[in-house]
Image (cartoon, rainbow, N blue to C red):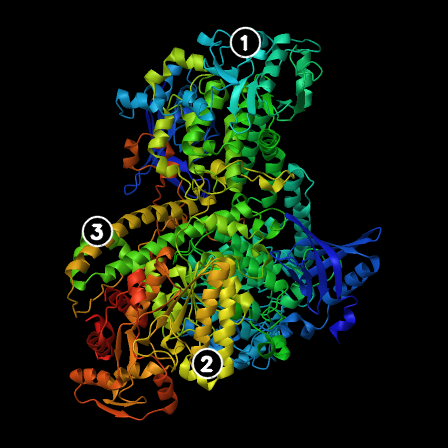
């Protein structure tokens, strides 16, 4: 089937969009296979992109020729579209209707979605059962991983791998499966390390009216008990419901057959009762006309909070039995796919600190909901606005999230994630571009080949830029069991979900931002103090710390913070909260950010091409100056672990202008360092790519910088000169006719930057770097690489083959000088700069001179020459010596490292006790 | 002391209402000012102090096998159930407390014996902290339109008004006196709030004695003068905060409301806020709900929501807010002046004027400003504190939670505008507590005149000075003077958002710690901010030293620093570990479920004191001094520090690299 067949009218102009709290937007409405798009063609107004699968119901109305479509979404939002022309309106309405109720899963958006981000970690493999079992494995000796369900033959709704008692073999499991509803034999849900007790879950036993029993079942669950201990079976149904189930072949565990178990019946509602509760609740939340009294009674009549209370109470009871009574628990209702999972997963939130972290919670959802076979496809097919009475819909998962929110509200510092994380999960369970919540169980997901054909939600969420939006700034690891209050006074309506579209959250959002600011600033200071202390010569460490009691106290904190692997996600860059697709986060008034943050004189720095030879070093240099989180590295590549953990990192493609602009706006960037470029040797090998990156990329950067008033730094190079330039010395202004694409693009950059400066007032600053020598990063394909490689080889093999002639003189600089110069020129007052592009230099030497100096330290070094004609030709066209007198005069440039210091430093760095001794 | 029949009873049990299974054994003491319960448990010796003035009701219940239960309900919503072994002792305690809780003269009140060990000068300075003359000056008065009137010198015109009042310049003494004769209790229109920016003002008065047709030229001139004092608007709003029916009924008694025909250019408006009796009953109902909910074994959500709804409490809060919003909009958006009254103009009028002022004026949303606001609209304008809050034995029909409602309105606003207020919820709760405690002289008596006669300022201490001294406890960490929410008028949505108003758990359940969030965001942020400040100072000092050292230390040492292992993440844990670590009774009515062993359900009654707090000036506020000493289950606490120690990994090397790199 083609989507085009369903789209009767793909496009209508002059459509007006109405939403609460926003002025109406007029624009063009477009229908695509998966999206409804409304865009006003003016600048500065956002586009509305609505997934068809998010549409729960639509109403249409006509007043004269004007048609109105009211779209009610599964996330409870209601929007109104005024469409001129009755025919268009009817066409649009019927198209939407058809597209939002596609009956084939494989037509859903996840099968068509192509991610615009780099997948750092494939979410489909993030939480494999084996890994989860591994987490327990040290503590568990009585349990094993069973693959009895490998072909989904024993239990269609279980995953292939489940954890069961070691004492029970696969054959017995097969027998037990026939005795439990849906083949759902008891499996391990949670292992409580503190006392070795467990929570198991299953379907109801199929005792029927004549009291069938199954010896293997009894043996299986008894295997979880310690000698002389009793366990609890929590049946989520009231006794009478459980008794009635016997008539249909179901039932419950008889005392006589399970003497070591005590059964407790609770009453958690299911199916249409929950669905009706949701419908009533959302209806009353949307009703703006009622008075105070009716609101409370409607809230009461919806029974939503009653369900919350019952679920939470049952989960607390389970946790209490486990933790306080030291008893094992078996939880089931009828199928064991709904209320059972609510109870087991909430009990884990209460008991297990790991499940209160972001990854732990994701693992919990993967394990206790997805793998455990909660039928998401059925339960989330319709939401609060569905009219048709379908049997399988129920907000079971939403109730679970609501319960988590209630606990989060009572323990605001004990969760690594925030409310937005829960809201995001709710949205994706109902409509998503990701395949995670498709299908009803693992078996279906395998058949659909979701892993191959769709993207996992976790692949997207677990990127640092997304995580920062979901990280709770108040989080402090709390290793305790947390006992929430379930008293009626302690439970509240989850406004973030149910009143989200009915109230303005402006003031609450501001408060959240303020909170983040307070905490971020504190962390920044801690980091600064930490760095400062480490900067003290070691001998003085103690003296300093002793004389400063506060610092002594704080230092571990700061160090912990810097070193903790959690840094990656903790490096939450405040405003990136506004990034993203969630409608709540669309920045509606762009002025808001700039005014409310303008008072901060703190620079916010973005480095493009940040993974190159200079970017990482520059970042750590600038981070000392501006604070860790104020310097953002970006690149198109995957960062190495240590870079990723050292501070904010964002994926960016400088050829993607919108992406670049988004990063600049959302992170309130004030300074941009543009390091993306293909260097000389590599550039010659791939001219078209070099042209795209070095020239088109630069144009994007210039436009973004001009548009948002950024101060822009673009490095230039000795390569920007050519054979016709004066070579010894080379002044700032002279003939520049380079013969490499690298050089040409750099001259282009210098000229374009200067042009933008004169034409648009762009604060463009540029330094022509000589060859840069650094110890801790690999050279990136430049002509001056030999001067770095010689040190590597000198220490490693004692032999070095130079691919330039021994008398090739080139200007060179040690990285520390280079970084310092870069920061100094950027900080120089505008009035002190008489030009935009400066030469800087430190030293100038030939390979022979360098070898000579190295030989002083390593006399056995053998240097041979094997000239590479390409590199040699490039080098021969470059300056031998830079005249940097203007830089020295205008903004006080002064280098620290000459050749002897350089050689000493580099060799120390590469020496055995190596990396630290660099400072000697 | 003569009222204390028995000063001490032993073997009394204090019942914990949340986990009713256990009770603390201890000794009960009666003193001249407090009831004190001291637990006998040797290691804790927890103490519970109750001021006599906080006691609302005492109830002796039927004797059981275990003893004679005595139920004490407090005005600050604390509830104590004591079980006294001997019926005779219980009776003595009961009779003594009945008398002690209802003093008949001011001199019996705690503030006359309370001595925070301040010298005279400090006490006088304390009373000067809040100065209304300065407040009027801050508003920009006197000016071309408004002047200070001496017409009420020595309380000649109105004995429930202050002596210093601002009136329109054009209102002569003759007009004022004439108008006062036409107003209930001679409470003539006087200025409450003046908006410098657009000259609009809020004035307040009592109802006119209009009956069915009476007129008063001077009163009409008075309103005219108020209108003319605002050159920006050609009309004046007159807001009668009563329901229309009540106002009409008053006409039969020769009172009533302004007839728009008689007053030129006024717009008359009713806003139906119910009277003090309705409010009293409403609160009563709401408290009964939550008491019932607390006492039930497994309270249901429906009981709670139905009860809350039937009490009507939130509807009344909304009515007061609506009135405040109406007036604030009139002043800020229409630039019109408003005259507000109810019947006598000292209850609803005070509520509404202060809510409107709070919305309009950022200054009142600061700590100091809020004190000023209460001083102005409540204390000086003759809100009848003694009657309303039952400080002395009197007519129970006069009692009504009028200022409680105002404080709740402020809290509801704080929930809507988390960054707009300099103070936090605790500040409101402490003010509420002291309105009833009579520990400070501020809220004594029914008028300025009475306070002067009693020489309150010479004989008692000021609460404001006390709160100001401890202001760090009351600060809202999210408040920033330059924040957009702080500046200007607070705009609430005009659409009737009913879900805006919520049950104030923090006030009405404040002694039920188990029902509160177990971790306080406010406290956490305050701790972070304090640390930030220290860090700033240390950083500055460090950098200075570093500079000096770097000058000296040109030689770079090769010795690699052995970093000391970060030992413990000494962050701020505001998590209330003891209570967080104690499950409540989730078993509900499951009879088969075994009872927990005694050490497990250790839920603290909140009002527990340590010896230290005895010395502090207000022991009764221990609820907020957070003395938790519940039995902790140490076995379940893995050493939190250990987990945070990072292992020797590359990360560490990198950091030391960076550090050395930076010295280079």
Report the disc number at residue A825.
none
Secondary structure of residue under mark 2: helix
Q: Residue at x 41, y 30 (%)?
A: B368
Q: Tell me if residue B435 can be seen.
A: yes
Mark sitting on residue A741:
2
Taking B357 as reference, is A671 above or below it?
Answer: below
Mark 1 residue element: loop
Task: Give the image location of residue A434, x and y in percent.
Answer: 59, 70
Report in which chain the residue with disc 3 lies: A
Which residue carries the number 1 mark?
A: B172
Q: Is residue A539 above or below residue B325?
A: below
Q: Is residue B591 left or right of residue A31?
A: left
Counting residues from the start of the chain, the first of labels 2 and 3 encountered is: 3
**Residue A763 percent coordinates (x, y):** 44, 60
Label disc, if present, on residue A548 of the rendered structure = 3
The image quadrant of residue A648 is bottom left
Chain letter behind tag 1: B
Which sits in the foreground, B443 or A577? A577
Q: Relative to A19, is B98 on the left or the right? A: left
Q: Nearer the viewer, residue A700 or A39?
A: A700
Task: Label 3: state its secondary structure.
Answer: loop
> Residue at (51%, 18%) from the top-left corner?
B146
For disc 2, the neighbor class at 10 Å (few under 14, some 14 to 19, many from 20) is: many
Determine the residue positioned at 16% across, 64% down.
B554
Which circle, 2 or 1, is nearer the viewer? 2
In percent of width and height, residue B598 lies at 39, 48
Residue A71 located left or right of residue A443: right
Could you say which quadrant of the image residue A892 lies in? bottom left
Q: Are marks 2 and 3 in contact (CB under 8 Å)?
A: no
Other residues around mark 1 within 10 Å, as few (<14) / some (14–19) / many (≥20): some
- Name the quarter where the C terminus of chain B is drawn: bottom left
Q: Nearer the viewer, mark 1 or mark 3?
A: 1
């Amino acid at each position: 089937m083609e989507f085009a067949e369903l789209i009767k009218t793909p496009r209508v102009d002059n459509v007006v969009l109405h939403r609460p709290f926003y002025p109406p937007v007029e624009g063009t409405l477009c229908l695509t296979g998966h999206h409804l798009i409304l865009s006003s063609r003016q600048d500065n107004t956002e586009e509305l992109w609505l997934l068809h699968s998010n549409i729960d119901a639509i109403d249409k109305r006509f007043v004269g020729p004007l048609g109105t479509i009211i779209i009610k979404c599964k996330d409870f939002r209601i929007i109104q579209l005024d469409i001129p022309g009755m025919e268009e309106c009817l066409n649009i309405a019927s198209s939407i209707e058809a597209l939002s109720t596609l009956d084939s899963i494989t037509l859903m958006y996840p099968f068509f979605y192509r991610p615009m981000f780099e997948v750092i970690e494939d979410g489909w493999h993030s939480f494999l059962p084996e890994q989860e079992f591994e987490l327990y494995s040290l503590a568990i000796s009585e349990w094993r991983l069973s693959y009895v369900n490998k072909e989904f033959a024993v239990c269609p709704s279980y995953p292939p791998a489940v954890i069961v008692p070691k004492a029970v073999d696969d054959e017995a499991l097969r027998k037990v499966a026939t005795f439990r509803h849906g083949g759902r034999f008891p499996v391990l849900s949670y292992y409580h390390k503190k006392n070795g007790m467990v929570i198991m879950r299953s379907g109801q036993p199929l005792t029927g009216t004549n009291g069938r029993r199954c010896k293997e079942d009894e043996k299986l669950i008894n295997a979880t008990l310690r000698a002389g201990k009793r366990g609890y079976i929590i049946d989520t149904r009231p006794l009478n419901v459980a008794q009635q189930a016997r008539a249909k072949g179901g039932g419950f565990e008889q005392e006589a057959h399970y003497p070591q178990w005590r059964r407790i019946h609770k009453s958690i509602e299911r199916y249409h009762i929950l669905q009706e509760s949701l419908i009533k609740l959302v209806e009353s939340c949307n009703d703006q006309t009622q008075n105070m009294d009716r609101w409370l009674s409607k809230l009461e009549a919806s029974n939503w909070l009653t369900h919350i209370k019952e679920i939470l109470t049952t989960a607390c009871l389970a946790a209490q039995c486990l933790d306080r009574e030291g008893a094992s628990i078996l939880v089931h209702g009828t199928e064991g796919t709904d209320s059972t999972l609510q109870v087991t997963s909430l009990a884990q939130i209460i008991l297990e600190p790991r499940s209160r972290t972001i990854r732990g919670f994701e693992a919990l959802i993967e394990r206790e909901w997805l793998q455990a076979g909660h039928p998401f496809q059925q339960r989330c097919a319709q939401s609060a606005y569905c009219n048709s009475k379908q049997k399988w819909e129920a907000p079971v998962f939403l109730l679970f999230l609501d319960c988590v929110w209630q606990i989060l509200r009572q323990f605001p510092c004990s969760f690594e994630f925030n409310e937005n994380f829960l809201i995001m999960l709710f949205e994706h369970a109902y409509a998503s571009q990701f395949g995670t919540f498709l299908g009803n169980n693992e078996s279906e997901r395998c058949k659909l080949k979701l892993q191959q054909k769709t993207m996992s939600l976790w692949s997207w969420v677990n990127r640092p830029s997304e995580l920062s939006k979901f990280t709770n700034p108040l989080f402090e690891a709390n290793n305790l069991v947390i006992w929430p209050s379930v008293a009626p006074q302690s439970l509240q309506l989850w406004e973030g979900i149910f009143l989200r579209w009915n109230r303005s959250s402006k003031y609450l959002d501001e408060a959240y931002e303020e909170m983040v600011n307070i905490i971020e600033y504190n962390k920044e200071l801690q980091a600064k103090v930490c760095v400062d202390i480490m900067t003290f010569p070691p001998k003085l460490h103690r003296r300093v710390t002793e004389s400063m009691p506060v610092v002594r106290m704080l230092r571990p904190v700061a160090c912990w913070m810097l070193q903790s692997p959690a840094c990656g996600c903790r490096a939450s860059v405040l405003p990136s909260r506004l990034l993203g697709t969630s409608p709540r986060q669309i920045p509606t008034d762009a002025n808001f950010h700039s005014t409310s943050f303008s008072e901060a004189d703190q620079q916010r720095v973005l480095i493009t091409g940040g993974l190159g030879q200079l970017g990482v070093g520059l970042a750590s240099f600038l981070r000392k100056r501006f604070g860790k989180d104020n310097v953002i590295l970006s690149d198109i590549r995957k960062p190495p672990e240590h870079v990723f953990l050292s501070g904010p990192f964002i994926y960016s493609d400088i050829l993607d202008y919108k992406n670049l602009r988004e990063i600049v706006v959302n992170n309130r960037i004030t300074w941009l360092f543009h390091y993306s470029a293909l260097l000389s040797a590599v550039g010659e090998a791939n001219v078209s790519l070099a042209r795209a990156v070095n020239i088109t990329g630069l144009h994007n950067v210039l436009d973004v910088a001009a548009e948002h008033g950024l101060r822009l730094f673009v490095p230039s190079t000795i390569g920007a000169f050519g054979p016709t330039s004066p070579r010894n010395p080379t002044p700032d202004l002279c003939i520049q006719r380079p013969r490499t694409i690298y050089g040409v693009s750099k001259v282009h950059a210098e000229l374009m930057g200067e042009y933008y400066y004169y034409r648009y007032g762009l604060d463009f600053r540029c330094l022509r770097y000589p060859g840069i020598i650094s110890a801790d990063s690999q050279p990136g394909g430049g002509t001056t690489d030999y001067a770095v490689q010689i040190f590597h080889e000198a220490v490693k093999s004692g032999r070095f083959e130079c691919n330039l002639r021994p008398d090739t003189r080139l200007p060179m600089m040690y990285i520390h000088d280079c970084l310092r110069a870069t920061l100094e020129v950027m900080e120089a007052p505008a009035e002190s700069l008489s030009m935009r592009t400066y030469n800087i230099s430190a030293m100038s030497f030939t390979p022979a001179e360098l070898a000579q100096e190295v030989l002083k330290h390593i006399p056995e070094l053998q240097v041979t020459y094997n000239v590479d004609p390409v590199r040699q030709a490039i080098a021969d066209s470059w300056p031998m010596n830079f005249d940097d007198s203007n830089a020295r005069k205008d903004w006080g440039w002064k280098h620290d490292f000459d050749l002897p210091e350089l050689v000493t430093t580099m060799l120390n760095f590469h020496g055995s006790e190596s990396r630290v001794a660099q400072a000697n | 002391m003569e009222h204390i029949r028995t000063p001490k009873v032993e073997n009394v049990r204090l019942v914990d209402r949340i986990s009713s299974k256990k009770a603390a054994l201890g000794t009960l003491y009666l003193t001249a000012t407090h009831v004190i319960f001291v637990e006998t448990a040797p290691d804790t010796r927890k103490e519970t102090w109750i001021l006599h003035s906080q006691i609302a009701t005492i109830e002796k219940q039927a004797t059981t096998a275990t003893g004679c239960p005595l139920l004490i309900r407090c005005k600050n919503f604390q509830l104590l159930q004591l079980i006294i072994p001997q019926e005779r002792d219980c009776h003595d305690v009961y009779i003594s407390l009945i008398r002690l809780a209802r003093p008949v003269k001011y001199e019996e009140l705690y503030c006359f014996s309370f001595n925070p060990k301040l010298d005279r000068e400090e006490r006088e300075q304390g009373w000067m902290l809040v100065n209304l003359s300065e407040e009027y000056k801050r508003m920009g008065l006197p000016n071309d339109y408004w002047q200070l009137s001496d017409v009420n010198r020595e309380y000649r015109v109105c004995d429930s008004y202050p002596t210093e009042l601002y009136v329109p310049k054009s209102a002569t003494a003759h007009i004022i006196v004439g108008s006062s004769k036409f107003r209930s209790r001679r409470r003539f229109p006087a200025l409450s709030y003046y908006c410098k920016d657009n000259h609009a003002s809020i004035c307040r008065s009592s109802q006119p004695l209009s009956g069915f047709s009476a007129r008063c030229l001077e009163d009409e001139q008075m309103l005219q003068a108020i209108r003319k004092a605002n050159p920006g608007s050609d009309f004046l709003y007159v807001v009668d905060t009563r329901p229309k029916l009540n106002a009409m009924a008053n006409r039969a008694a020769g009172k009533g409301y302004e007839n728009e025909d008689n007053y030129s250019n006024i717009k008359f408006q009713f806003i139906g806020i119910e009277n003090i009796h309705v409010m009293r009953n409403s609160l009563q109902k709401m408290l009964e709900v939550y008491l019932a909910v607390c006492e039930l074994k497994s309270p249901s959500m429906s009981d709670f929501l139905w009860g809350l709804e039937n009490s009507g409490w939130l509807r009344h809060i909304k009515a007061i807010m609506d009135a405040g919003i109406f007036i604030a909009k009139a002043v800020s958006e229409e630039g019109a002046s408003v005259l507000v009254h109810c019947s006598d103009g000292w209850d609803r009028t005070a509520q509404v004027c202060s809510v409107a002022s709070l919305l309009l004026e950022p200054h009142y949303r600061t700590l100091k400003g809020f004190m000023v606001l209460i001083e102005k609209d409540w204390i000086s304008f003759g809100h009848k504190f003694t009657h309303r809050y039952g400080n002395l034995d009197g007519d129970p029909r006069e009692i009504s939670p009028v200022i409680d409602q105002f404080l709740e309105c402020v809290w509801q606003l704080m929930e809507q505008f988390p960054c707009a207020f300099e103070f936090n919820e605790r500040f409101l709760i402490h003010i509420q507590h002291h309105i009833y405690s009579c520990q400070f002289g501020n809220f004594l008596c029914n008028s300025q005149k009475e306070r002067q006669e009693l020489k309150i300022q010479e004989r008692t201490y000021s609460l404001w000075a006390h709160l100001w001294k401890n202001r760090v406890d009351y600060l809202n960490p999210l408040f920033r003077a330059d924040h957009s929410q702080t500046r200007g008028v607070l705009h609430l949505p005009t659409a009737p958002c009913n879900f805006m108003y919520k049950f104030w758990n923090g006030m009405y359940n404040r002694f039920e710690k188990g029902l509160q969030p177990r971790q306080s965001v406010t406290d956490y942020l305050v701790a972070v901010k304090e640390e930030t400040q220290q860090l700033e100072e240390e950083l500055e000092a460090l950098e200075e030293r570093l500079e000096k050292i770097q000058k000296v230390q040109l030689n770079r040492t090769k010795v690699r620093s052995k970093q000391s292992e970060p030992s413990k993440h000494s962050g701020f844990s505001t998590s209330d570990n003891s209570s967080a670590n104690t499950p409540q009774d989730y078993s509900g009515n499951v009879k088969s479920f075994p009872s927990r062993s005694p050490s497990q359900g250790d839920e603290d009654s909140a009002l527990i004191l340590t010896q230290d707090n005895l010395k502090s000036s207000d022991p009764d506020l221990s609820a907020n001094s957070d003395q938790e000493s519940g039995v902790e289950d140490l076995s379940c606490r893995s050493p939190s520090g250990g987990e945070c120690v990072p292992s020797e990994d590359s990360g560490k090397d990198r950091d030391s690299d960076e550090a050395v790199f930076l010295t280079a």
